[in-house]
Image (cartoon, grey):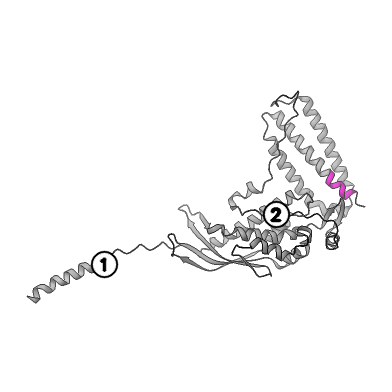
Amino acid sequence: MTASVHPLLSAAALVCLLAACGKKEEPQPADLACADPAVLQNIQNTLQQSVREQAQTFARNDVRQFVDADKVIAAAAQMTFSLDNPQQDNSSTRPFCQAALNITLPADSLKTAHTNAPLIYGDKPLDKVIAERILGSGLNYNGSGTFAQTLKYTPARAEDGTFSVTYADNGLAAAANALSGALLPYGIKSLLLVDGKAVSLEDALKMAKSGGKIEIVEEPASEPQAASAAADNAAPAPEVLTPPLRNEEAAKPAVSDDEIDRAKDDHRAADSEINALWRNLEPTVQQGLQDEQREWINRKTANCRRAAAQADSPEQAEYLRLQCDTRQTRERIRYLRGYSDSE
């Protein structure tokens, strides 16, 4: 009797074992590429692009024109990044990665930024500016140029090979704002226009420290943008100009030959005036302004090209381009006169 029951019990035990006695194992979450080098590259690109955008925005909006955005961008390109101990966390509904992010500013750039800070932040020390920007963010600053935070992110690689990273709680926003605030003073130009006079950076700092009249203009920091949107975000807003209205009627697409001729005359006059003004500047002043002048020309050309794109006809496009160019040249003439009259 016992011999006939034993095989049945063994079979039942085998079935129970294979079926796990009716229990189903939960599927394991897929492994995320937490340590993929592309993650660190994405972080670097995102933060450097954000600093670029904020520096360009500040430079465009600062009527004093104290900051050379290209200098800030160059300093941001020298920042070093590390992503330490990346691990996958499966404790929530959706798995994610977390790692210790460290960002270090170039020492020489940080030293210069501390020196120049009064020209942007007034009496507020640079370390205090940084502390305000990281307040409540989970980002830490060691006071010597290194920022650290625990970053949560989810990497993904599409079938076509493209790699993307999603950051939890906009985790890079505080870092971008702090980096921008720290590097802006580094971009101060060597020759400044203060109260209509050309002043060296050293003299401007002396004026600021002795209570001299230095207008402080600090723009609010912006959120970091995706690197793919860089070109659109960095471009200045188009200047939209229209021909003058006649007898309070709505503007018409067509522009008369007389209007175009007057626009050409105004443009030639402004162009001749700025060229003569530039030639009469002291060579040292010209050298100090050369890069800035080249940047202004490129910006004016792009701005007026977009203005012309608003036209409904080739004639109106030419009119809008000339009008835009003349207006911006006149503004530049007023600015350069401050250097011409500085002696």
Residue at the far front: name it. Answer: 136
Quick check: 100 above or below 237? below
Q: Position of residue 64 (x, y in %)?
A: 79, 51
> Mark 2 or mark 1: which comes first in sequence?
1
Q: Is residue 195 above or below residue 151?
A: above
Horizontal side of residue 225 vs 256, given as left or right: left
Return the x and y of residue 129 as percentages of the image width and height: 70, 62
Q: Which residue is more in the foreground, 274 or 66?
A: 66
Q: Main secondary structure of the magenta part?
A: helix
| Residue 149 visible from this viewpoint | yes
Q: Would you name the residue on which mark 1 appears?
A: 20
The residue located at (61%, 65%) in the rendering is 139
* Residue, far right: 343
Residue for point 84% across, 43% down: 333
Q: Amino acid at mark 1?
A: Ala
Which residue is at the front of the view, 142 or 37? 142
In the image, residue 6 lies in the stretch drawn in magenta: no
Residue shown at the point (71%, 66%) measured from the top left:
127
The residue under label 2 is which amino acid type? Ala
Q: Which mark is residue 55?
A: 2
Q: Residue drawn 56% across and 57% down?
A: 170
At which x and y percent is residue 166?
Answer: 52, 56
